[in-house]
Image (spheres, rainbow, N blue to C red):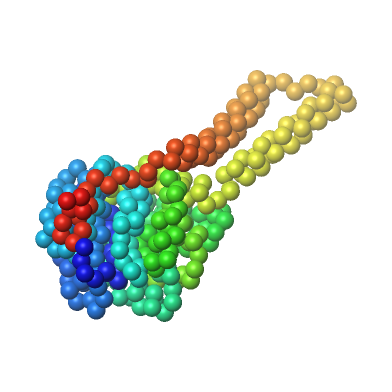
Amino acid sequence: MPNSTPQVSFVIPVYNEESNLPMLADRLVKIMDQSTITLEAVLIDDGSRDNSRTMLQQLALSDPRFHVVLLSRNHGHQLALTAGLSVARGSEGVFVLDGDLQDPPELLDTFYAKFQEGYDVVYAVREKRKEVFYKRFAYFIFYRILKKIANIDIPLDSGDFSFMSRRVVNVLNKMPEESRFIRGMRTWIGFKQIGIAYDRQERASGDSKYSFSKLVQLALNGIYNFSEFPIKFVTSLGGFAIVSSVIYLIFVVVKKMFFDQVIEGFTALLFVIILFGGIQLMAIGVLGEYILRIFFQSKSRPNFIIEKEICAGKYLDE
């Protein structure tokens, strides 16, 4: 272990980023060389299938300021980030960003200055996103829906890119959630928080590793973990269905008793069956989402498994 504990740790999950790693490493080295505070860069390989794993090991063995964690398989971005937070040694805090260089590491000084003013969390707010239109639109809609229905005030257009104080990181490391939505957990912790606006850049190279299904899963984690809306919506929908049924029943009875008419029509009957059948299936699906999260959480499995860790220029198991 090095003689001095770093004041701040970069925490950067990496997955199949061999084309971006040389540029990322160069920019981090330049920042660490010029900084007046002691820094380390924690890079977490999330089971990469390209040459990223080998490149990270070579980097950590050649420069002791790089702290590399190799996970046993692909656990997903949020759990890889969780693994990095668990080993980060920064005594004052951590600076979280992605490995694709859409989040500029050079903003460290700006975030750190806010931390020195007394803020425990300094999060980035994306003013502009240089991504395809449908993604920008989906993000825009999601954050506004989440802000409307969440039981905490999650900032708009804010991702994982942030500076967090050591005490915030310590609390995060004690939170055992399996279905993690770290930007929501960060808000839930509280303390003094502030946002800094920035323009999110395009990826330096390569394609996004967040597939559509992974983005949907992340969104669902945010909604189900930080909102009571799904279950309350289904309850309200059930109430609406009952009231509608009673009104329709009264309507049918009145027509029969006072006008001697009986409602006819197979189409109307089929519509009612499909409508209420759909409501029931949706209710089961919402309950299933909650039960599935309880099921996985109750297993108490570790959220991630570290295969190898290189710190201070050597493997920790040596």
| Residue lying farthest to the right in this orientation | 258
Choose between 308 and 26: the one closer to the eye: 308
149 sits to left or right of 48: right
User: Is 256 situated above or below 202?
Assistant: above
Choose between 258 and 309: the one closer to the eye: 309
Kindly identify the residue that appears in the image at 44 percent across and 49 percent down. Answer: 176
Choose between 141 and 175: the one closer to the eye: 175
User: Is 181 situated above or below 264?
Assistant: below
- Find residue 163 and report its horizontal and vertical position in percent: 36, 67
The answer, for residue 139, to whether it is visible in the render is: yes
Kindly identify the residue that appears in the image at 38 percent across and 56 percent down. Answer: 136
- Classify the position of the N terminus by image quarter: bottom left
Kindly identify the residue that appears in the image at 34 percent across and 74 percent down. Answer: 112
- Find residue 110 and report its horizontal and vertical position in percent: 33, 75
User: Is 30 situated above or below 220?
Assistant: below
The answer, for residue 59, to whether it is visible in the render is: no
Kindly identify the residue that appears in the image at 43 percent across and 64 percent down. Answer: 168
- Find residue 276 and report its horizontal and vertical position in percent: 63, 30
42 sits to left or right of 281: left
Residue 239 falls in image quadrant: top right
- Find residue 225 and report its horizontal and vertical position in percent: 50, 49
